[in-house]
Image (spheres, rainbow, N blue to C red):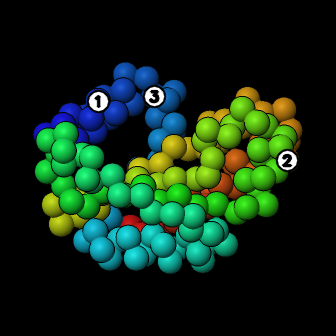
Amino acid sequence: MKRLLLIGLIISSWLVSPVYAEDLLMTRSKQTFPEAMLALQGSIAEHGYTLSRVQRVDIGLTKSGYKTDKYRIVFFGKSSEVNAIKFAEPELIPYLPLKIAIFAEGQETMLVAANPVQYASFVRNKNIADILRRWENDLRSIFNDVK
């Protein structure tokens, strides 16, 4: 119920303020959670990224009253690009590496990620802005692969 409320708030914020609609990338996969997780990890690797870790979030959520056992955050990136951004734009460090939240919703799976291009307007370095735009394209492609 809480998850549905959160998703409802996100969707309603898009309706109220369409300018912010691209701050999040979201897709629904018809695949079950295990299949979608496998497809996600495969697509991340196919796009040249290194999987850093998969963090279980469901344990804490279950203790808070959520009824899900399938909720993860997948961290990934390209070390050379992450290091370049850390050096050139240290204020972006809290947003690194890339992350995708993946969770089961019935027999389907939802994927959600912050859109990295939203930070491009704040950076001073054009090369870093280009990396952020490419990351957005890669995330959209990864989501399409999992869909």
Residue 40: give x, y in percent of width and height. Answer: 45, 70
Q: Which residue, given by chain and number where applicable, does mark 1 sit on?
A: 9
Label 2 environment density (alpha carbons within 10 Å; few <14, some 14–19, many ≥20): some
Callout in the foreground (3, 1): 1
Label whose residue precedes the other's in the sequence (3 or 1): 1
Let me know if residue 91 appears in the view.
yes
In the drawing, what numbered circle is on residue 127? Answer: 2
Compared with 120, 17 (above or below) is above
Label whose residue precedes the other's in the sequence (2 or 3): 3
Q: CA distance from mark 2 to mark 3?
A: 28 Å
Determine the residue positioned at 27% across, 46% down.
60
Q: Amino acid at mark 2?
A: Asn
Callout in the foreground (2, 3): 2
In the displayed structure image, the side of residue 117 where residue 88 appears, left or right = right
108 or 103, nearer to the observer: 103
Q: Amino acid at mark 3?
A: Pro
Q: Amino acid at mark 1?
A: Leu
Label 3 environment density (alpha carbons within 10 Å; few <14, some 14–19, many ≥20): few
In the displayed structure image, the side of residue 5 where residue 16 appears, left or right = right
For the C terminus, give its image quadrant. bottom left
Residue 28: give x, y in percent of width and height. Answer: 32, 58
Q: CA distance from mark 3 to mark 1?
A: 13 Å
